[in-house]
Structure formats: structure tokens, C-alpha cells
Amino acid sequence: MKNYQMLIDGEWVNSSNNETFPTVNPFNQKMWATIPQASDEDVQLAVKAAKRAFENVWSKMNGLKRASLMFKLADLIDKNATYLSKLETTDNGKVIRETKTQMHFAARNYRFFAGYADKLNGEVIPLDNDELLDYTLREPLGVAVLITSWNSPVSLLANKLAPALASGNTVVIKPSEHTSATTLEIGKLVQEAGFPDGVVNIVTGDGKVGDTLTKIKEVNKISFTGGVKTGVIISRNASENLIPVTMELGGKSPNIIFEDADLEAAIIGAVAGIYAAGGQTCIAGSRLLVHQSIYEEAIEKITDKAKGIILGNPLDKATEMGPVANEQQFKHILSMIKKGKEEKAELVCGGERVINEQLRSGFFISPTVFANVHNDMSIAREEIFGPVLSVIPFADEEEALTIANDSEYGLAAGIWSKDVKRIHRFAKKLQSGVVWANTYRVTAAQAPFGGMKRSGHGRERGYHALLDYTQVKNVMVNLSNDIRDPFSIQV
Ligand code: NAD
């Protein structure tokens, strides 16, 4: 049994009221660590430490030094990737082959943004009046609060922490109460890399901790990954202090197979879209739109694949799908499957808890396919965040577009077609922050990621993420000796 502590101002501490909560392995339901439940006082201390570190150290340190610390952190994450991935898999049930990749991808993200730390230049702007010199400075915001969900703690954190640090902000992190361990381990690596005290602080606990954190006046930025309901509450808190927020929320992403697609490849893409990570990913391609001429064939093929998926211990390299990460989520998925049946979608396979000898202690749900789904049904509208695919037929491109965009979400979308003109035409019309063509669930440090509509706003990864953690200052310098008219604005 591990007893974790929180990181505040360079010190590892218990909660000031000594409260803790258990963290459970979703594969066997065994408690394996305790995590502190931060008090309001702890949260205040963490923000104060971040503010001090921002004013006294981090905002004064040059980009090259910040970058070198970030490169060290990236090296340490790579070095500890096996350990970290085993821990993350133990904590959230995600298969080891994915968590291991995610650790190296997190390291890649720190390196990508470290490369920007000494290149955050402003610009010289030519004005109408050439006796005025105009230039901009790109400056950090101050204390950034980073709140993450349970499905990919280290990877989601890298999306936020790397651009925040590179651009000179200090942070207070709050990971999900379901999976806090690996974030705290990253805290240890931050220290080993040699970051000054207070630059990175980590407080743990439930939503109440997040709520306190997002109401504090000294906070200058909030970046949140999680559900829409929480996103709305946090946005409200942020508006009281008029601070900017980045919102990475849910999705109900359409993965669209046209009649001219390479069907074999498209079906693999559909599997990657909904059964990878057991569908517990914001970009899950949970609505599979299929042209009516290939609909039956596609249903047959995806069902075959779904039935063949290897469920098992997520620490085992052969396992393709692990358990659902926690009981709350497990109950939600089953309730959505029930709704699908009640609304008369056709359950083709799966749809139940797996209770064989090896898996009965975990929250396993068999890969599920619903056919003849109408886009008005709950299973096509609400985020399930589980291995449940809704297959929806369409007659032509226009109908496919209407169905795809008829969602309150707009995070990701996939297009499968051999017609290059159709791909570009369609990509332009999709209301989605991320569009893949002839692939799905592929990511890159350089490519901006984020949602439209109720999937959120702001971008992570890529150069665009830096814009969310910096503000622009404009400086105008008079080069002339003319005496101005003080009662008229000068242009
Ligand atoms: P959640 O909203 O319940 O919790 C997310 C985080 O917010 C947790 O750390 C939680 O403790 C904290 N929190 C809860 N209430 C709070 C409050 N009132 N104030 C401040 N913080 C609070 O979400 P979840 O169940 O952890 O994650 C699942 C959701 O996350 C899904 O909707 C999924 O789509 C979304 N998600 C989005 C992305 C993305 O990049 N767009 C990535 C992963 C997950």
C-alpha cells in the first residue's frame, strides 16, 4: 500500500486535516494507495506558492533555462516510462500498450514546447505613421490551474503543463480523484529535474478541491479537461474573476464511411475509434455513419471485430481492452445500453457485463454494437464514454453531413473515402475541431487539438496552445520631435 502526499512549494505534504481517500485498481477492485484530500487551506497555500514562484523566479528565468529543465523532465519521463505506465494502468485500467505509448508521447510534448521556451518573440508592426515604432511582447499569464480527468492523466497533463511552463507560467495541478497517482509521480520527476520550488504544485482531492481552486482571485488561467457539466461550473467560477479558460470537454464524434472507402481500413479505424481504451476517450468515434449501400457488410465486419477483441488484465501486453475505469462510469455505460434497447436500436453484439472467471472482479463490458440507430436516440446524442458503438445509415453526402453536424458536441470526426475532393469538401463543412481522413485517433505534438460547440474551446498541443497561456502587450514608441495636439487622438 502506497501513501501518497501532495506537492506544495517544493515540499511533500499530507492534507492539513490529515484526510485521505483510497485509490482502487479497476481490474481487481483492490485498494492499492491512499491519496490526500486537500483542505481549503492547502489549496490556498498551493496558489500562494505558485504566485511567489511566478513573481520571484519563473517569470524572471530566461527561456533557455526553462527549456533545459523541461528537456530534463522529458528525459526522466522516458526513462521511467515502464514504471509510470504500469502505475497508470493499475490506476485506470487502460491497457499497457497504450499507457506506455502515452508516456513517451507526454515526453515528446514537453520537448516540443521546450523548443518554444526561448522563441516566444513578439513582432514589429508597421503603422500608417512611420514615426511611431510599434512592437508586441508575448508574456505569461501568471498562475495557471490545470484540472484533469481520469482517462489519461499523464498525457492530458502534458498537454497543459508543457505549454504553461514553456511560456513562463507557474501552476497548481489537480488530477482526478480516481487517478491521482501518476500525476504525483510526475511531481517527483519535476523535482528530480531541478525545477525551482513552487513552480509546479499538485493538490489532490475531489471536485470540492477543484471548485475552491477555481474561485481563488490570484489564479490567472484555468485549463480544464473533463465533462461538460463541470466545465460549465468552472467557467462560471472563472467569469467571476474574469480569467481565461481552456475547455477540453466531451464528444459524440462521427466516423463516416462512404461507399468508395477502403472498407477493411475503415473498419480498423472504427475499432480504433470506439474500442481502443474501451471507448473511454473524448475523441471516441461513437457514431459510425455508414453509406446505405455498404451498411449490412459494415455491420457484419465491425461485429466480427468486436467479438474478437481480447479482454483481460490491462497489464498484460496481449490485452486489447481493459475494464471500465470506475464504478460510476460502469453504471453509466450500462444505463446507456439499457436506454438504447428501450429506444429500439438493434443490439447486434455485446451490451452486458462480462462475468467469466478471469474478469468478474473487474468492471468489464463486452464490446457493443447497436445497428439501425437514429441520430435522435439517446445513444447517438449523449456521451457514453464506453465501448458502445451506434451505427447509423445515410443515403448521400448531404445526409451524412446533416447527421454528423447534428450534435451538441464538435470534438473529432473521421472521413473514409478514396475521393480526395470529397475529403476536403467535407472536412471544411464538418463542425469539429479535429478531422481525420482515412485514419482515426492519430495524434502529434505539432497538431492543434480541441473542440467546437459544447466540446469546448481553446487548443492544446501545437503552437496554438502557447497562445492560450500567454497575453500580448503592445508597445508604441514615438520617434518624432513634433509637438502634438493634446485634444485630438493621434493616428
Ligand atoms: P469530470 O468533469 O467529472 O471531472 C474532471 C475533473 O474535474 C476531476 O479532476 C474532478 O475532480 C474535477 N471537478 C469535478 N467537479 C469540479 C468542480 N465543481 N470544480 C472544479 N473541478 C471539479 O470528468 P471525468 O469524469 O473525470 O472525465 C470524463 C469527461 O472528460 C468526459 O466527458 C470526457 O469526454 C472528458 N474528456 C475530454 C478530453 C478532451 O481533451 N476534450 C479528454 C479526456 C476526457
Image: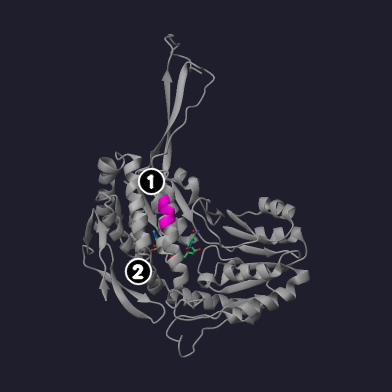
Tell me where residue 88 sits by quadrant. bottom left
Tell me where residue 79 sits by quadrant. bottom left
Magenta span of residues: 107-111
Q: In this view, does 87 lie to the left or right of 430?
A: left
User: In the rendered image, which residue does mark 2 sit on?
Assistant: 83
Residue closer to the observer: 2 or 35: 2
Residue closer to the observer: 245 or 423: 423
Q: In this view, does 65 lie to the left or right of 470?
A: left
User: In the rendered image, which residue does mark 1 sit on?
Assistant: 166
Task: Check the image and report above or below for 399 versus 421.
Answer: below
Q: Where is residue 347 in the image (x, y as percent from the top left)?
A: 64, 80
Q: In this view, does 448 lie to the left or right of 476?
A: right
- The reply to whether residue 238 is in sight is no
Is disc 1 placed on a helix, strand or loop?
A: helix
Q: Distance between the residues labelled 2 and 1?
A: 26 Å
Camera-near label (2 vs 1) is 2
Tell me where residue 345 sits by quadrant. bottom right
- For label 1, being within 8 Å of ligand 1 is answered no
- Sequence-wise, which precedes: disc 2 or disc 1? 2
* Residue 109 within the magenta-colored segment of the rendering: yes
Q: Position of residue 340 (x, y in %)?
A: 61, 76
Q: Position of residue 143 (x, y in %)?
A: 33, 47
SS majority, magenta: helix
- The reply to whether residue 357 is in sight is yes
Is disc 2 placed on a helix, strand or loop?
A: helix
**What residue lies at 39% left-to-right and 40% top-to-bottom?**
118
Q: In which quarter of the image is the N terminus?
A: bottom left
Q: Where is residue 291 in the image (x, y as percent from the top left)?
A: 74, 67
Q: What residue type is labelled 2?
A: Tyr
Residue closer to the observer: 120 or 451: 120
